Image (cartoon, helix red, strand yellow):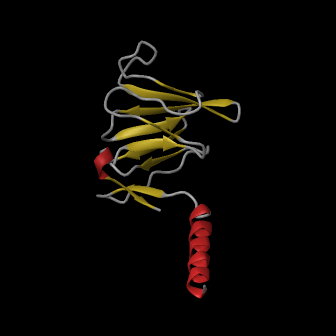
């Protein structure tokens, strides 16, 4: 009975500390250059296979290869680089956040920029395989 109580206490502590841990820090493995969180609830993270995702508290929206894939609540519009709606080399997300739309652009993977409304940007000096997360 005592062992069971101790186990339940430890599990509760783990769940509580994990739930309130905060956002992860993402950096490139080579240079430890952190990716600055966006001024919304969105941030860039790396999943278990090393492919970057844009996520929020409700789910994740990701991409794979040259064709952009959308997941989520329908408020995110993700276009293929070759799509007529997204001319040029950039992959673009139009994100609705608190009634306002933000644009996130990614110029391919290596050495790319992510910007929101053209005034905030973070340089990525790594390919997706070189991302690491510090959670």
Q: Position of residue 67 (x, y in %)?
A: 35, 26
Q: Position of residue 30 (x, y in %)?
A: 29, 58
Image quadrant of residue 39? top right
- Residue at (37%, 52%) from the top-left corner? 48
Q: Residue at x 59, y 69 (%)?
A: 17
The residue positioned farthest toward the front in the image shown: 1
15 left or right of 91? right
Number of numbered discs: 0
- 119 relative to 50 in the view: left or right: right
Point out the image quarter for the N terminus: bottom right
Taking 26 as reference, is 116 left or right? Answer: right
Q: Residue furthest right?
A: 99
72 up-or-down from 9: above or below: above
From the viewer's perspective, is residue 38 above or below residue 91? below
Q: Residue furthest bottom?
A: 2
Residue 41 percent location from the top left of the image: 61, 45
Q: Residue at x 32, y 28 (%)?
A: 66
- Where is residue 133? Give x, y as percent: 41, 58
Question: Closest to the observer: 49 or 106?
Answer: 49
Q: 22 or 121, which lies in front?
A: 22
Left or right, 46 with reference to 22: left
Q: Nearer the viewer, residue 86 or 31?
A: 86
The answer to whether 22 is drawn above or below residue 72 in the figure is below
């Amino acid at each position: 009975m005592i062992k069971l109580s101790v186990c339940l206490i430890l599990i509760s502590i783990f769940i509580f500390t994990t739930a309130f841990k905060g956002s992860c820090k993402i950096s490139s493995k080579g240079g430890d250059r952190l990716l600055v969180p966006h001024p919304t609830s969105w941030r860039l993270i790396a999943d278990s296979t090393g492919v970057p995702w844009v996520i929020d508290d409700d789910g994740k929206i990701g991409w794979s290869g040259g064709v952009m894939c959308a997941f989520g609540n329908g408020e995110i519009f993700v276009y293929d680089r070759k799509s007529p709606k997204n001319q040029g080399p950039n992959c673009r997300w139009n994100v609705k956040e608190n009634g306002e739309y933000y644009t996130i652009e990614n110029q391919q993977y290596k050495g790319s920029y992510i910007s929101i409304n053209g005034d905030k940007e973070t340089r990525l000096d790594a390919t997706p395989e070189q991302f690491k997360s510090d959670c």
